[in-house]
Image (cartoon, rainbow, N blue to C red):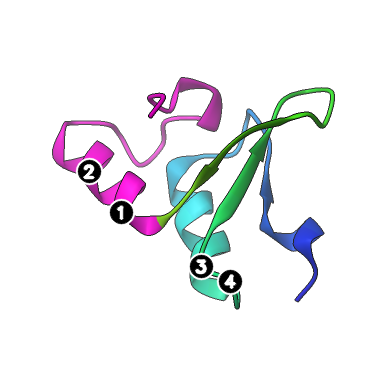
Amino acid sequence: MSIEVQIAKPETTVREMIAIIDRASVKLCVLVDDYGKLRRTIVDGDIRRSLLSGISMDCHASEFPDQ
């Protein structure tokens, strides 16, 4: 699997990020901004903690809490 498949853009939802991580051989998602610049990496634990704190599965990556 290429890294391009693991990239999440600002409009990617939490639900879609989970699918990206699930399909990836390296279990992380690379979040980039509108210009393709690395914003952060997201792993399943980040998503689990955010869901437990009340974030919606339909929340966009641009709204995802910073580390």
User: Around disc 2, counting alpha carbons within 10 Å, would you say few (fewer than 14), some (14 to 19), or many (20 or more)?
Assistant: few
Q: Determine the secondary structure under disc 4.
A: loop
Three-letter code for the amino acid on which mark 1 is drawn: Gly
The structure residue drawn at horizontal position 42% and vertical position 30%, both measured from the top left corner, is 59
- Quote the CA–CA distance across marks 4 and 1: 14 Å
Tell which circle, 3 or 2, labels the residue nearer the N-terminal end: 3
Give the residues drawn in magenta, as a range.
Answer: 44-67
Q: What residue is shown with label 3? A: 27
Above-or-below relation of 2 to 46: below
Question: Is 20 positioned to the left or the right of 3 in the image?
Answer: left
User: Around disc 1, counting alpha carbons within 10 Å, would you say few (fewer than 14), some (14 to 19), or many (20 or more)?
Assistant: few
Three-letter code for the amino acid on which mark 3 is drawn: Lys
The structure residue drawn at horizontal position 49% and vertical position 71%, both measured from the top left corner, is 22
Q: Determine the secondary structure under disc 1.
A: helix
Whether pointer 4 and pointer 3 mark residues with C-beta atoms closer than 8 Å, the reply is yes
- Quote the CA–CA distance across marks 3 and 2: 16 Å
Magenta highlight on residue 18? no
Q: What residue is shown with label 4? A: 26
Tell which circle, 3 or 1, labels the residue nearer the N-terminal end: 3
- Quote the CA–CA distance across marks 1 and 2: 6 Å
Q: What residue is shown with label 2? A: 49
